[in-house]
Image: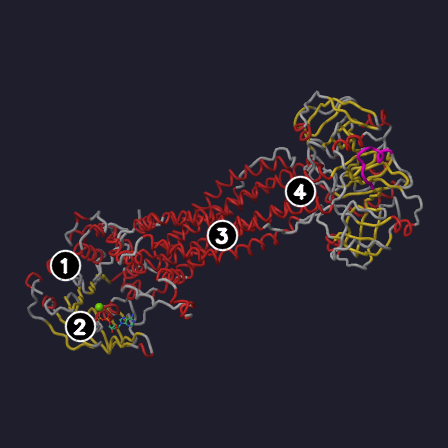
Amino acid sequence: MKIQNKFLLRKIKNQLPQLISAALIIAIGVGFFVTLKTVLYQYQKMSEIYYEEYSLADYTIYGVEIDVNDVEKVRQIDGIKAAEGRVMADYVSGDTTLRTFSVPIKEPLINKTYFYEGNHIKKDSECLLLKKYADVNELKIGDNIELKIQNEIHNFTITGLVATPEFVYLAQSESVPMADPLAFGVVYISENYFKDRLNIGYNQINVMLHREVDSAEVTKQIKESLKPKKVLYDLFKDQQISYKMYIEDHNQINSFAYIFPFIFFIIAAMIIYVLQKRNIVRERKQIGILKAMGLSNIKIVGIYTKYAIVVAVLGSLAGCLFSIVLGDYILDIFGEMFDIPELIFTVYLGLWVIGFIIALVVCVVSNFVGIKKVLKIKPAEAMNAEKPKKGKKILLENIKPLWNRLSFNTRYSLKTSLRNKGRFFAVVFGMAVSVALAVFALGFNDSFNYLINTHYNDFVKYDLMVNIKAVPLEREIEIIRLPGVQTYFKSTILPVKIEKENQKLDYPLLIMEDGFDMLNLKNEAGEKINLKDGIALPSYVANKLGVNKGDKVKLSSFGSYFDDIEVEVRDTTLQASSFYIYANYDFIEKEFEINNMLYNTIFIKTDKDVKELSQRINDGEEVISTTSKEQDKNTMLKILETMSFMIQILIIFAIMLGIIVLYAVGIINLTARSYEFIVLKVMGYGTIDIMIAYVKEIFFQIVIAVPFGFLLGNLILQGIKGEFSNDSFVLIPHIYNKSYLLATLLLVIISSIVLLLSIKTINRLDIVEGLKTRED
Amino acid sequence: MNLYEINNITKIYGDGETKVNALNGVSLNIEEGKFVVVLGASGSGKSTLLNILGGMDNATSGEIIFNGKNITELDQRKLTRFRKENIGFVFQSYNLLPNLTALENVEFSTEISKLPKQGADNALAIVGLSQRKNHYPAELSGGEQQRISIARAIAKKPKVLLCDEPTGALDYKTGIMVLNVLRDINKKQETTVVLITHSQDIAKIADVVIKMRSGQILEAVTNPTPLMPDEVEW
Ligand SMILES: Nc1ncnc2c1ncn2[C@@H]1O[C@H](COP(=O)(O)OP(=O)(O)O)[C@@H](O)[C@H]1O
Ligand SMILES: [Mg+2]
């Protein structure tokens, strides 16, 4: 082996702890990046394949009493690849709701089902059931399920357990984007059953479009062809809730995949910089000898660069291997959250290469910045021992009365810690980032928690929301007379599009009676919202549309209830979820000249058991479905729970990061000061005294680092909040004090561990050896 | 033939208040194959001169011809090459690389100069330390370390060996041993040796003694009867 390489290897051996620390941080950065990117690619690839192979509809149109001829007419339109009519309805099954779709016996062409188990239905008495629902409700192939349709119980035998691209997320509605499979599922029964037994016609048409068609034009033609039948609603693929959630998640993971590795790479770069800078100070003389012997600058830089390359290679290799374990774990959790068949971990070598290249660039560049002074070292000067640095005065020294009052130990601690600012701030930065990660992770959790709690405790005031068949406003229906119904309000909820200039959004319009108090609708000033002669919008929606109080917006309701109309936005509401457009009956009746208003929703408050009441309401003739506040809240809490794994991972990283940085820089500090410590020891200064000075230094660093960590953690949370806000809820950063406390405590514990580790090193300092080896 | 022709070189360190004139117009010729001793008190500019001769530093003004080639104005890269090909250094502090064994320290030098490695074993034999070649510097005495550093310097067969107080940190007996080695190399390999010392006695082994004071050469004396190192006492 070449001596140069031996030289390098011995250097590595001598500084193994520092090298491993730097490599570990690189490993975390690369590991995090490669894991998230792999998960993302795999998730994206498998979902795209899934959407493609199982033909998620490009476009869906909702109407009433659509028949085969209508579907045939649509199919004839240019640019349409396939069209299929379908029935969609929500039915109660026991105490759960099943979204029920019709399927042809010969299998559908659009929104196909993936079979985990079993086969397609052959008879009208058979059904396919969503596996996710079947699993938690302990249903198997061959079991029966009961559906309450038109107040009669209908039985179906399960022949297949399936998944569908429509329900990658078990999205029940905008307000329940991730339903609890214990309470909500999907079932497919035969088309003939609907037609022959129930006499129910299609209420939607799913459409696949040819690739390069003007979709706006085609959909216009579709609506045209269906006239005079009413179109209630239409959806493009990218508006479909489950698909929309998929895109959002994709962006969330992506933002994580960059932000965190970026932070880790900065820290790795810092450690390498500090380490190498220290190394060339230590090895100044050696470098002088090498130069005197005729080794060129390039060769010397080469030796140090190889050291950095070793860090990059070891770090990125470990990171990539680590990504296999972590990626597998994350995809497992994904499997519980999303229903994508065959979502398993695979290695993307291309990502490994990218990870390695990033690590290499980070290491080599930070190494070079650290050692660039090598170029300036003159062999003749390097041969002489470096002149001791003139001790610089620190700021505090000028405040004489204070400075003189400090003990020698404190003065010594302050002076040594500030002597090398690079190392001092490397530690401060490492600490700050540790705290920031912890604050961010805990704060992320807090914000969701806060959102859910304030939303369901302070904003949502009803216990049950009952969806009924539309009836005239004057008519009272049976269920309100059930015992346990304390107060109730009638209201009408209609799907509408709201439009301002070119921005169009879909939100339900909630028309309410005077005195409605089922939602705590307040504006920014904390007053009850004003609905006189206009509508109100959640401020999130108003911001998205770019409208202010007093502006006019266009409302359109898909042709069925009223014509497009301009209305004034009178107020905005403060709320984090459950977004509606608000109006009262007076305004709607006047503005739209409707005098036979129908209502389709009843909000109920109860003083009795919600579950029991909800079951009795479900038996009511007019009732389509009920949702309870409790149920919605639990669903949200459940989403939060599934996200908590991410928080745990981040906290673990924060701890690792803290320990590694403090330990690595700590060792560099100790070796740099070992001569000084030895001199102190010779003078009779004990390990304890040295430790006390060291503790003071770390305390000093913690005091500086913690506020920065808080700030940085908040900034990350602010930066990421956009990715986590969607049309179902807005994430408002809210960090509990206890999280700040916990993050600080974490840092103190990490620092103590590192301190304990360094006691050993200080104790081991050999006075005799130490005085001799000053030179290197 | 002259190995070095030095014409009126000066060296100024620093500027303003901290300005030091380390060399004040030094002119001198050094003949090939000679054992030259530079004698002077501490601070007289000996090391500065030696560093400039070795291409470790540039003179502020003046001219240095080495082996017929002007090396005065060479840039860092060319100076590095010049050192690699022509110069062997021995320092007062032995300056061995602590992480490498004796043999590896010597081999490193041949590796840098791209010479065959057996030169290293040979050089260790010349300094009489073949049997300690696998020891690390920390396991060797000062005299042994200095002989290793001489082996390192001569392994690449340099034209000239520049020694800055090589015995300064050694006791009398080991000092003699080191001087013997240098004298042998000078005589047997015909390597020119320039050795710095502040000791009048050591100067007695030289063919030529150059006396310096305050950055100037007082005189250059040819010694008709150089002593053997064993005959010197200090
Ligand atoms: N790098 C330097 N910067 C400033 N002054 C220097 C430097 N090196 C040497 N000197 C000064 O130059 C003079 C000659 O030094 P030097 O050649 O080392 O003397 P010697 O080797 O004879 O003891 C001394 O006064 C010394 O302080
Ligand atoms: Mg000197």
Q: Amino acid at mark 1?
A: Val
Mark 4 Cβ and ligand 1 under 8 Å apart:
no
Which chain letter goes with mark 3?
A
* Segment colored magenta: A478-488
Mark 2 Cβ and ligand 1 under 8 Å apart:
yes
Q: Are marks 3 and 1 in contact (CB under 8 Å)?
A: no
Q: Which residue is mark 1?
A: B178
Task: Answer with left or right where residue A681 lies relative to residue A239.
Answer: left
Q: Amino acid at mark 2?
A: Ala
**Closer to the camera, A120 or A602?**
A602
Classify 10 Å Cα crowding around label 4: few (below 14), some (14-19), many (20 and above). some
Image position, residue B212 (x, y; %): 18, 75
Which of the two marks, 1 or 4, is nearer to us in this view? 4
> How far is disc 3 from disc 1 in space, using C-alphas?
52 Å
Q: Which residue is mark 3?
A: A265
**Closer to the camera, A83 or A252?**
A252
